Amino acid sequence: MNLWLGLAGTLAGTIGGLLLYVASPQQQLRAAGPWPTRHAWWPGTLLVLLSLLALWPLLAPLEAIASWSVLLMLVWSLAPFLGAWRARVRAGRSA
């Protein structure tokens, strides 16, 4: 049970962080730009909060918040590099 809850929390945090990055106007992961809806940040926010709720019973409260913050920082640090790489690959194909 604890393993599955930890994996679910990690996966929800990773996907939520990516969804929040894709909702930003300067992202380069999607070729079409950010999500066209006005409230594009809702799905990512819900998944990120669900991630924290999944990690909360596994760890002490301070440890859960710290690991959750580190996970989000990791996702938000890698996402711009993945977006730049995808934009470069797309530009290479079209040229």
Image: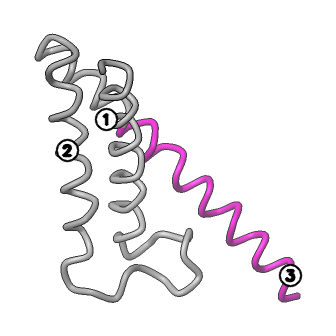
Residue 47 higher or lower than 65, as above or below? below
> Outermost residue toward the left?
61
Mark drawn on residue 9: 1
What label does residue 66 carry, if any? none
Coloured how? one colour
Q: Is residue 40 above or below residue 65?
A: below
First in sequence: mark 1 or mark 2? 1
Q: Is residue 2 magenta?
A: no
Instruction: Please give the residue where the numbered disc 3 appears in the rendered image.
Output: 93
Q: Secondary structure at mark 2?
A: helix
- Judging by the rendered image, the residue that carries numbered circle 2 is 50
Q: In the image, which residues are magenta?
A: 72-95
Q: The residue under label 2 is which amino acid type?
A: Leu
Q: Pointer 1 and pointer 2: residues touching (CB < 8 Å)? A: yes
Q: CA distance from mark 3 to mark 1?
A: 36 Å
Q: How many marks?
A: 3
Residue 34 figure quarter = bottom left
